[in-house]
Amino acid sequence: MSSSRHEHQRKLRVVHQRRLNILEELAATIGKQTAPPHVLMEIDELREKIAALDAQLADGEDSLPNVRALWNHVSGRCGRSSRQSAARC
């Protein structure tokens, strides 16, 4: 992985972590049972994005197709595009 790509992913992880921390604090403040569904969904999505970035940074290689497949799976986009293969979803 190029150093600029690695640096970009590291910065992206920091941004995602900051947003996750804020949303988790919000959910804790208002209570998980009363938190808006979009907040809880974004918390889950950010956790998965951070995990994917951590895996990429640990591997030190570009596994962007795996991140796209994860995002498509999480966002419910699997099967919507004829370009995607079943193996990626």
Image: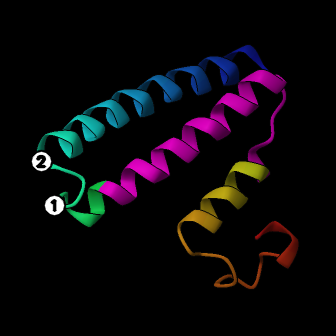
Q: Could you tell me what secondary structure mostly forms the magenta stretch?
A: helix
Given residues 37 and 7, the one toward you in this image is 37
Q: Position of residue 82 (x, y in %)?
A: 75, 85
SS label for mark 2: helix
Quadrant of the snapshot with the N terminus: top right
| 16 left or right of 36 in image | right
Q: Position of residue 48 (x, y in %)?
A: 57, 46
| Mark 1–mark 2 distance (CA, rounded to whole Å) | 6 Å
Residue stretch rendered in magenta on the structure = 40-65
- The 10 Å Cα crowd at callout 2, few under 14, some 14 to 19, many 20 or more, is few
Find out whether the residues at labels 1 and 2 contact each other: C-beta distance under 8 Å.
yes
Report the residue marked by disc 1: 34
**Amino acid tagged 1:** Thr
Going by the picture, which residue comes out furthest to the left?
30
Q: Is residue 8 above or below residue 20?
A: above
**Where is residue 60, by image quadrant?**
top right
- The 10 Å Cα crowd at callout 1, few under 14, some 14 to 19, many 20 or more, is few
Quadrant of the snapshot with the C terminus: bottom right
Disc sitting over residue 8 in the figure: none
Q: How many marks?
A: 2
Report the residue marked by disc 2: 30
Q: Is residue 47 above or below residue 84?
A: above
